[in-house]
């Protein structure tokens, strides 16, 4: 079967999750952050993901915005910045304005020109995703933005991936699923999707019993792969 539907994870795949800390670190008054922004951003992202997995396991779902705040609070304390309420507020504000990677608009336009369905499938809360899509100016090249909030459990629960086939009426082998999170891509592969792992930082493959069909360093070749899969 030919690919009819291209689905993208949001954070880290289309949107740069390090952009908030990087930008704040360059602003006046945040010199303490400037000394550790890269580590703080990595800690923030790691805890954000860990808290989604733990909440999925325990059945204690809460909105991704709360998880994002909880992860930031842990990261601020881990880096000795827990008392800086102004910094916390600024980082959270910037998280609603994450920049898209530079190849994203051209890539999505190419997919739409080819007549393919395009959508986001994300742990993000609907309002967060709406803000990110609006800020990046890519709403006109997306057919939908699907949030786990509609099923009340985070990835990699199978019912999250089911949202795609329910929304687009497609078969599993008609879907190209793209994520920068290796575990997400492998879970989607196990579900039955064709998957691409966008490995921007050259990390090893996770050992989870499945493999992506392709590993890329960015999103540039996605329209090409959608034609040949």
Image (cartoon, rainbow, N blue to C red):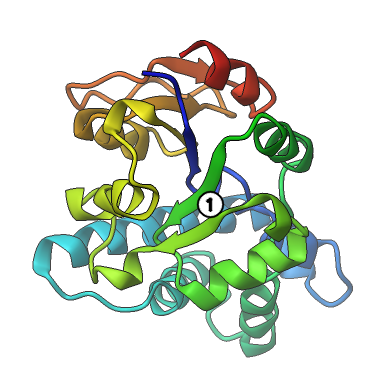
Of all residues, the one furthest to the top in this rendering is 228
Q: Foreground: 195 or 41?
A: 195
Q: Secondary structure at mark 1?
A: loop
Q: Foreground: 76 or 20?
A: 20
Question: Residue 198's x, y, as percent?
Answer: 53, 29
Question: Is 5 located above or below residue 93 in the figure?
Answer: above
Q: Residues within 10 Å of mark 1 (few under 14, many from 20)?
A: many
Is 5 positioned to the left or the right of 219 in the image?
A: left
Residue at the spot x=78%, y=36% of the render? 106
Of all residues, the one furthest to the right in this rendering is 28
Does the rendering let one see residue 143? Answer: yes
Quadrant of image for the C terminus = top left
Q: Foreground: 134 or 204?
A: 134
Residue at the spot x=65%, y=72% of the render? 131
The residue identified by callout 1 is: 10
Question: Residue 118's x, y, as percent?
Answer: 55, 44
């Amino acid at each position: 079967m030919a690919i009819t539907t291209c689905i993208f994870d949001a954070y880290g795949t289309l949107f740069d999750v390090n952009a908030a800390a990087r930008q704040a670190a360059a602003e006046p008054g945040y010199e303490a952050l400037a000394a550790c922004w890269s580590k703080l951003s990595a800690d923030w992202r790691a805890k954000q993901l860990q808290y989604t997995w733990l909440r999925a396991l325990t059945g204690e779902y809460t909105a991704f915005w709360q998880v994002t705040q909880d992860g930031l609070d842990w990261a601020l304390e881990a880096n000795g910045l827990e008392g800086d309420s102004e910094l916390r507020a600024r980082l959270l504000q910037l998280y609603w304005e994450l920049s898209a990677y530079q190849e994203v608009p051209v890539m999505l336009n190419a997919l739409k020109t080819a007549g393919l369905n395009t959508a986001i499938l994300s742990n993000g809360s609907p309002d967060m995703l709406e803000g990110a899509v609006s800020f990046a100016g890519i709403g006109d090249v997306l057919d939908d933005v699907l949030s786990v909030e509609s099923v009340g459990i985070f990835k990699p629960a199978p019912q999250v991936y089911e949202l795609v086939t329910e929304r687009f009426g497609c078969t599993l082998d008609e879907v190209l699923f793209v994520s920068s999170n290796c575990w997400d891509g492998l879970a989607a592969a196990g579900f039955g999707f064709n998957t691409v792992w966008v490995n921007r930082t050259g990390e090893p493959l996770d050992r989870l019993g499945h493999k992506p069909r392709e590993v890329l360093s960015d999103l540039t070749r996605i329209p090409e792969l959608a034609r040949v899969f």
